[in-house]
Image (cartoon, helix red, strand yellow):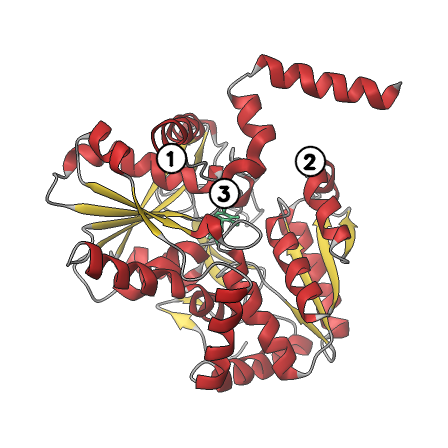
Amino acid sequence: MNGQGYHGDLGGCFVPEILVTVLNELTDAFESVKNNAAFLKTYDDIMSTYSCRPTPLTYAGNLTEYLGGPRIYIKREDLNHSGAHKLNNVIGQGMLVQHMGKTRVIAETGAGQHGVAVATMAAKFQLECTIYMGEVDIRRQRPNVFWMEQLGAEVVPVKEGSGTLKDAINAALRDWSGSASHTHYVLGTACGPHPFPEMVMFFQSTIGREVREKMLIQEKRLPRRIYACAGGGSNALGAFGAFLEDDVELVAVEAGGLGKQTQKHASRLAWGVGSVGVAQGYKSYFLQNPDGQMRLTHSVAAGLDYIGISPILASLWESGRVRCEAATDEDVVAAFRLTAKKEGLLPALESSHAFAQAFQEASELGPDDSIVIIMSGRGDKDIFTVADALEDAEWKRFIIDRGDSYRA
Ligand SMILES: *Cc1c(COP(=O)(O)O)cnc(C)c1O
């Protein structure tokens, strides 16, 4: 363990000896580029010409009127190429790979969104790309597997454990232990060993800087509150980073799943269910049994369905700077429907957690206040889940007909 990367008592770097050198090298590489004007300019150029930065801040007039509370603004990370904030981080790490002279990237993916973003980046930068994905997730997320393969990545099924995200992370770490001389591990969120939490937050911090700039133009002052969903915590930290010193309330919204009592959720902080432990290279709050066994998590939003949480976000929560809440699947689907009908926007089910919490608290604030909701990604990827949740009969018929046409 090296002594860096602590946030309060959390964070650190708990990895096998063989990876310590690699992570130290990565820390040095990151430190050398993060204040380098040429590197940052190239990053901005790529993000504005290949993706859609700066992303708009949309005034949600119909929702504002309907809810009768604060003026509501929506930060449009859904307009990034590949449909979510994930590309902000992935392009940054890709440039770092080029800087370090490596030729191959590996990554873990759960729902497949991070895998698609990494495969996209690898194609653009012409890097060899291997994505580790749990066997169960591969079956559940066929469309994303298809796209990763079209983008030139090799998708490796992970059979160990429950065949889901945490097993994919372990497999990627194993690969990296033997391949680090030419391979970089593109971690997808602000978790994992130092320097990943700080590095991922850094590449996502463009979100908060843009929100700040636009609010000062449009409202002439900062918002009262900012709402962001929290899986690993990268879009939340990216948004919150620019406001830590200000009088702005920062609200992170976890996956409340089917509710606290059912244990079928992924709320590590809001409901006081998670406890501090060390796993997957870092110390933070995890959903675990008293003996340290990781529990199974549940969320309608695959991207929030994770046992751990960023040590930086957890530390900000411990200090009281960030408030944590959890939204249930039911409230999330309702928030998705309302946003679609009132604004013509389809937030990802992950992002819809932030919308659900903001809607619930709208009556606490008045028309002189404004709030910002981070729309971390677009929801058309969630058509299978949303159509199921809404029990859409025509959709069901369509799926059955498709199945029949393959059997015929
Ligand atoms: C992956 C994902 C998330 C969760 O990741 P964070 O690191 O918590 O931001 C949230 N929203 C969308 C759309 C995602 O794809």
Instruction: Determine the CA span between mark 2 and mark 3.
Output: 19 Å
Circle 2: element type: helix
Where residue 380 sits, quadrant-wise, is top right
Instruction: Determine the CA span between mark 1 and mark 3.
Output: 18 Å
**Disc 3: CA contacts within 10 A as few (<14), some (14-19) or many (>=20):** many
* Residue located farthest toward the right when viewing the structure as drawn: 408
Residue 54's x, y, as percent? 40, 61
Q: Amino acid at mark 3?
A: Arg
Residue 19's x, y, as percent? 65, 75
Nearer to us of marks 1 and 3 is: 3
Instruction: Determine the CA span between mark 2 and mark 1.
Output: 23 Å
Circle 1: element type: strand
Q: Residue at x 49, y 45 (%)?
A: 287
Looking at the image, residue 66 lies above or below residue 85: above
Quadrant containing the C terminus is top right
Q: Residue at x 69, y 35 (%)?
A: 140
Residue 266's x, y, as percent? 47, 40
Q: Earlier in the sequence, mark 2 or mark 1?
A: 2
**Residue annotated with mark 1:** 327
Q: Amino acid at mark 2?
A: Arg
Where residue 162 sits, quadrant-wise, is top right
**Residue annotated with mark 3:** 378
Q: Amino acid at mark 1?
A: Ala
Residue 202's x, y, as percent? 43, 70
Disc 3 CB within 8 Å of nearest ligand 1 atom:
yes
Tell me the number on the disc at residue 140: 2
